[in-house]
Image (spheres, rainbow, N blue to C red):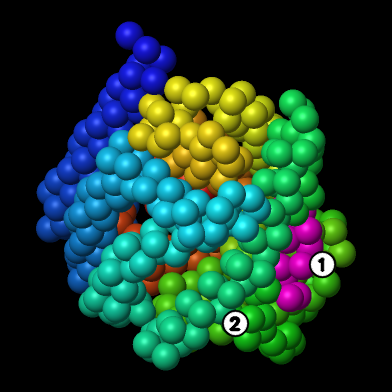
Amino acid sequence: MSYSLIFTLAFAAALVAGLIVKFWLASRQVRHVAQHRGAVPAAFTQTITLAAHQKAADYTIAKARFGLVEMAWSATLLLGWTLLGGLDLLNKLLLAWIGGGMAQQLALLAAFAAIGGLLELPFTLWQTFRLEERFGFNKMTWKLWLVDTLKSTLLGAVIGLPIAALILWLMGAAGQLWWLWAWGAWMGFNLLLMLIYPTFIAPLFNKFKPLDDPTLKERVTALMKRCGFAAKGLFVMDGSTRSAHANAYFTGFGASKRVVFYDTLLRQLNAGEVEAVLAHELGHFKHRHIVKRLVAMFALSLAGFALLGWVSTQVWFYTGLGVQPNMTAPNSALALLLFMVAVPVFGFFVAPLPARLSRKHEFEADAYAVAQTSGADLSAALLKLYQDNASTLTPDPVFVKFYYSHPPASERLARMT
């Protein structure tokens, strides 16, 4: 049996097994939430109404069912691009039209992204204008959606094409260790994005204004001083122009760090609760979760580039995924695309590990917030956010262990009492 056939069978088996597990987990989630829809859990009867609990259940079930359809469509597209020859056909068409070289490789990356985006567009529109609209979360108009889409596309081209060109050039010109140089370029690019995102990219999509509530500003400033956190400013973002969901976060890197509150968050929570939510976010900073995740990203990306450096030289990697490698033109763009679509198929089965680590970090951040502010305020804030975001209080335990990056409300609140 050839290596190509072995890889084809391994890819197909991983894809099918992943789909089976995903459908099983989604079915468990739908069934478990539906079974507990009729009554508010005992721990929340004094704080959550039955109507709010049932809305959260219905929203969760609707998202899960929509996810099943989207999942099936994504798997179909993946097969179409790979084993059914879609990427191979696109590559040959562009070779015949443009010829080999950098232009053809960049065109292949751009065409793949554009065609994939168009094929997934109906699901994006349905989620925004039907699913989110149905439950009262969508605030985006068609005009705003179109403007955002155009901005995202142009930004993706302006930012993405140069770094793609650099990596493709390194793949062809930097020798056998090109992957090490490409990894360095990729990491530098990501760090640069973290630096410029708050001041140059985010304002292209949202309006940010300085926090002007003097009482809240004083409390938040005192909290950050206690926590040893320095930020360039406190800002309020107009999240309500797009969604009713609420959040707070800090963003940026080094001197560009900003604390950002959604305007929807400030409308829903009182000053003490906002302070507690920010203390939770600062808990991530204090426990160096962001640094740890960056280090993990650096290590995983290094391993990924090293693996790409090897498989890009193996003919079976291309033919096993339904693509005939070019004989007279570079295969760098083909290798990048095939690697990007194949890794998630195999990587799905280790997804519970980072999810578990993320939940551990959330517990640590909660504990830090309780130590710095009021546990009662944090509990009240979380309950309001769970209710306003229609997050179910009764998720399936297995689904939680596999997917949830944040612990369920019952587990988080139990540790605060």
Residue to which mark 1 is pinned: 256
Residue range (magenta): 190-200
The residue to which callout 2 is attached is 206
Instruction: For the residues labelled 1 and 2, say whether their Cβ atoms are less than 8 Å apart.
Output: no
Helix, strand or loop status at disc 2: loop
Q: Is residue 279 magenta?
A: no
Is residue 347 at least partly visible in the picture?
A: no
Q: Is 159 situated above or below 328?
A: below
Q: Earlier in the sequence, mark 1 or mark 2?
A: 2
Q: Position of residue 169 (x, y in %)?
A: 73, 46
Vertically, is 290 above or below 83? below
Question: Is residue 195 a member of the stretch shown in magenta?
Answer: yes
Q: Assess disc 1: are there few (<14), some (14-19) or many (≥20) residues with their C-alpha within 10 Å of its C-alpha.
A: some
CA distance for labels 1 and 2? 17 Å
Q: Main secondary structure of the magenta part?
A: helix
Is 216 or 28 nearer to us in this picture?
A: 28
Residue in view at x 56 percent, y 79 percent: 151
Please identify the quadrant where the N terminus is shown.
top left
Amino acid type at circle 1 is Ser
Q: Is residue 413 left or right of residue 68?
A: right
Q: Position of residue 259 (x, y in %)?
A: 71, 70
Q: Position of residue 143 (x, y in %)?
A: 42, 90
User: Residue at the spot x=47%, y=54% of the render?
Assistant: 96
User: Three-letter amino acid code at disc 2?
Assistant: Asn
Q: Nearer the viewer, residue 257 or 19?
A: 19
Q: Is residue 213 above or below residue 388?
A: below
